[in-house]
Image (spheres, rainbow, N blue to C red):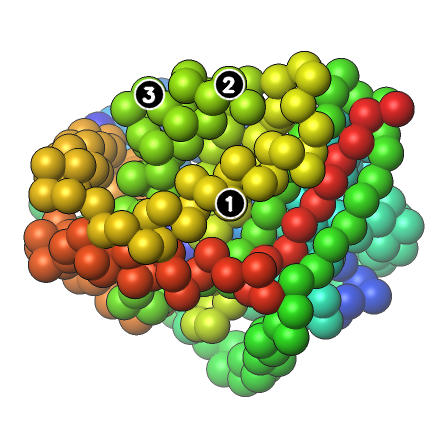
Amino acid sequence: MTTVNLMYNVGSKDEHPDHTGFAHLFEHLMFAGSARVPDFDKAIREASGENNAWTSRDVTNYYITLPSHKLDTALFLESDRMSSLNINQRSLEIQKQVVLEEFKQRHLNQPYGDVSMLLRSLAYEGHPYSWPTIGKSTEHIEAFNLDDVHAFYRRHYNPDNAVLAITGDFDFERLKELSQEYFGAIAAAKADKPEFPVWPQQEGPRFLEVERPVPGPALYKLWRAHAVCEEEYTTCDLLTDALSLGNSSRLYQQLVKERQVFSQADIYVGGEGLAGAGSILFSGKPVKGVSLEEAEKALEACLNQIATEAPGQEELNKILNKHESAFLFQNTDARHLATQACWYEILGSADNYLQEPERLKNLNGEDLRSMAEKVFRPENCSTLYYRNT
């Protein structure tokens, strides 16, 4: 088996604040067929393969996994829709309706669906990360026209704005020939990337409170941290593992099991790629009878503890072992490895991903304590109280 992963360096961060959701909509349009392949999914099925795609704030990713002797089929399909996508009004209207339904299902018609929109808008005010990948509103999605599609395609979907990674069973010399054959003649756009605004430091804590018809109240927090492209990201990642990876983690032991303040509590590092715009996020649902104010104080006490007392060697070793084993097991999946190779190459170098286990070995408990002290400050935090009506 072989996985062909093609990642374009364009996401929702590249949109205008009054014209959001287009990167995600265009991902859908990429499956509408091309000049020589009217039905993309059918061609994949006939090659005994599978494919899909996703859009983030930073990139748009496409992958195909299929038997290795069909590698040239995958490369042909990707090159054909990179060079001659079938763009028409009917496809645009169909995909707009699909995305509109997805927007409603994800953000309007399910409990807590608007949390990410509210929290990111509060924390990233004025920054391209402040709106969700799917867009700010249904009105933005409905407003797109064919001129928008053609302009976006010409600007972003070309070889100089993409990274191709292939993993699994293949002959490297043959692969070089196929890559040149299918992609070598596609012209580069050579479009200049815009300068993204700097995410300014907060001058004080930010707070938002809303009421919604949901089963129970919830607490959400977002702290400014380090992005994936920054060396300190690994420390942030390990810090959140110490706090919430598994049933032996601090949040579970102290806040869920022992004190029974939260029925569930999770903290994780964000996946942002822009330097200076990373995040650490917390989400938790207090048990019945515990107020959001009480729950927040209990959380702050737990975070203050790791910010003042460095984890001991035994706890650190446990976290490092879990992190390394997860890293190794994930990379037995050729698709995961191909995706990460593309992502880290866009950020600077694919080698940075493969060197992660070595970087982890250089970290100690004091590194985690110092990062916690730096990140978990009130003036560095945006808080959302999500009350139930």
Specify which label sits upstream in the sequence, 3 or 2. Answer: 3
Residue 320 located left or right of residue 243: left
**Helix, strand, or loop for circle 3?**
loop
Question: Residue 116, image x and y in percent?
Answer: 67, 44
Q: Quadrant of the N terminus?
A: top left
The circle on residue 260 is: 2
On the image, which quarter does residue 12 sit in?
bottom right
Query: Disc 3 marks which residue?
Result: 247
Asked whether disc 1 touches disc 3, contact meaning CB atoms under 8 Å apart, the reply is: no
Residue 106 located left or right of residue 201: right
- Amino acid at dot 1: Glu
Question: Residue 386, image x and y in percent?
Answer: 75, 35
Residue 325 in sight in this render: yes
Q: Badge 3, how many Cα within 10 Å: few under 14, some, many 20+? A: few
Please name whichever residue, 47 or 31, is drawn nearer the observer in this view of the structure: 31
Q: Relative to 314, is 148 above or below?
A: below
Q: Nearer the viewer, mark 3 or mark 2?
A: 2
Query: Disc 1 marks which residue?
Result: 300
Question: Residue 325, image x and y in percent?
Answer: 15, 32
Specify which label sits upstream in the sequence, 1 or 3. Answer: 3
Distance between mark 1 and mark 2 Cα atoms: 15 Å
- Amino acid at dot 3: Asn
